[in-house]
Image: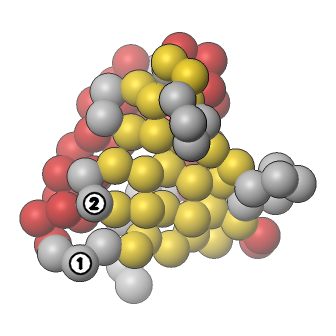
Amino acid sequence: MKNDIETKEILSVYEHIIQHGEACEDGKHYQGVTAFSDIDGYTIYLKGSGVQLRFGFHNTYHLDYEHDKHKDDFLKKIENILNEV
């Protein structure tokens, strides 16, 4: 998979959502993206537009999605949040 997002950008977006997002059942929600982590905090997740990004050990990530349009919408939301950081 081509690296669409820099790992430091994922962490920046995650932190921004955690700081500025509204609490929801899954974690914190901000501008269409939900951020949460597993119980030990080693794996973080960003979810929105039918996409789930899993970021974990060794600064690797994986995007789960069914359609390219979902991925494109998700990446656009990530980019918009990055512009605020």
In this view, the residue in front, 77 or 83, is 77
How many other residues sit within 10 Å of disc 1, few (<14), some (14-19) or many (≥20)? few
Amino acid carrying mark 2 in the image: Gly
Q: Secondary structure at mark 1?
A: loop
Instruction: Please tell me which residue is depicted at 62% across the width and 44% down the height of the picture.
Output: 36
Q: Position of residue 25 (x, y in %)?
A: 56, 36
Q: Secondary structure at mark 2?
A: loop
- Looking at the rendering, which quadrant does residue 58 occupy? bottom right
The answer to whether the residue labelled 2 contacts the one labelled 1, judged by CB atoms less than 8 Å apart, is yes
Q: Position of residue 47 (x, y in %)?
A: 43, 51
Amino acid carrying mark 1 in the image: Glu
For the residues labelled 2 and 1, the Cα–Cα distance comes to: 8 Å
- Residue 5 lies left or right of residue 10; in this view the side is left
Instruction: Identify the residue position indicated by label 1 in the image.
Output: 66
Name, please, the residue furthest toward the left: 69
Residue 23 vertical placement versus 66 (above, below): above
Answer yes or no: is residue 59 visible: no
Instruction: Identify the residue position indicated by label 2 in the image.
Output: 50
- Looking at the rendering, which quadrant does residue 23 occupy? top right
In this view, the residue in front, 67 or 85, is 67
Residue 22 vertical placement versus 40 (above, below): above
Instruction: Please tell me which residue is depicted at 46% across the width and 40% down the height of the picture.
Output: 34
Q: Position of residue 41 (x, y in %)?
A: 82, 50
Q: Position of residue 66 (x, y in %)?
A: 23, 78
If you read the primary sequence from the N terminus, does the residue marked by circle 2 or circle 1 appear first?
2
Answer yes or no: is residue 41 visible: yes
How many other residues sit within 10 Å of disc 2, few (<14), some (14-19) or many (≥20)? some
